[in-house]
Image (cartoon, helix red, strand yellow):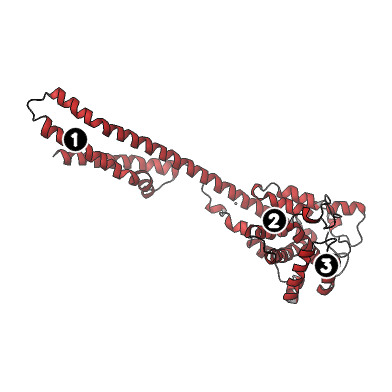
Amino acid sequence: MIAVTGLAAGVFYQVLNYAVFVPVGLLRRALNPVAVWREGFQPFLPFHFFFLAISLGLIYIYRLYVLRDSGTSDVYSTLLIMLCLLPVLGLIYAFRAYAHQRELATEKGRLAAHNERLALRNERLALQAVASQVTALDLKDNYTARHSAAVAQWATDIANALGLGEHEVNVTHLASLLHDVGKIGVPDEVLNQAAQLDGGGWALLESHCENGHKILSHIDQFDELATVVLYHHERYDGEGYPVGLAGEDIPLISRIICVADSYSAMVSDRPYRKRLFPEVAREELELKKGAQFDPEVVDCFLDLLEQNDLFYQRGEHVDFHVEFQKVKFLRELPPEEEAPEAEAGGVRSGTSA
């Protein structure tokens, strides 16, 4: 009878406790009843029943042996059973402390995961905002988006052919797509000027590297992206801009983009000249190998061009928006709707500018 009564009391306590916490979990954390059961009750049931069984066993022993022993006073028997219950009380206290710490750790982990997803969602939004700037720039220049997509295709192929790691290849692809975003701050008359640019015009055009660096440096998780864009017009011989780095001091990805960018400018129609034939552009790359361009990167790119057809060599079949959807980093970020809410993503000598 004692065991049945104790078991019924324990079950009633758990049911009442569950009934109280279901609306609390729903209001505070938007948890449904099943989630409340799995998180707050199911993991602890074995412990509760363990303590219940021990307690009932002690009570049974107390009534069966201690109280029926006429030679033992009730006071002494009560003290004896309380002494026996001390280890149980200690276990219960330890269990409660463990459960509390576990709950705190779970909440901390959930909050950290929530904050991380919010940060990743913000990165997604930042990348999409920059891509929108490239699209807006294309309306000004009617060249930038397709050019950027072609550069992304060629530069990514070069990076793969050179044996770069997956992360470096992904940075190459994304940086290529966004390398000209700084031109959003260059006046239209400079971007579309058919005549040779004067010194002031060139200064404005060259500022697009630093403009792009300023825009991209605000994307915290992609610091190297801004650096790559800043140096993509440095020359191998140190005569480039904006700071005059040379050789191996220029980031490899910047050197790769420099080659693909210059080739794209040569095989595209520009306000100041018609596009060059791919074979002429390849000769220009070969001629400036070791001066403007990294020789190893040029040799690798020339091999790729030789292996592919005329459409690939002209970069005519690429689309910026399609290439942007291929961005590895963007695919890894959680879509905005999946992120949890707060508890309750001019040319010089035929080469690119």
Name the element at disc 2: helix
Residue 128 drawn at (x, y percent): 65, 54
For label 1, the residue is 58
Q: Is residue 41 left or right of residue 186?
A: left
For the residue marked with disc 1, what is the amino acid? Leu
Q: Nearer the viewer, residue 261 or 246?
A: 246
Residue 60 drawn at (x, y percent): 15, 36
Q: Of callouts 2 and 1, which one flags the residue occurring earlier in the amino acid sequence? A: 1
For label 2, the residue is 132
What residue is shown at x 63% (from left), y 62% (from top)?
325
Residue 95 drawn at (x, y percent): 34, 37
Q: Which mark is residue 83?
A: none
What residue is shown at x 81% (from left), y 62% (from top)?
293
For the residue marked with disc 2, what is the amino acid? Ser
* Crowdedness near tag 1: few (<14), some (14–19) or many (≥20) residues, C-alpha within 10 Å: some
For label 3, the residue is 285
| Residue 319 vertical placement versus 117 (above, below) | below
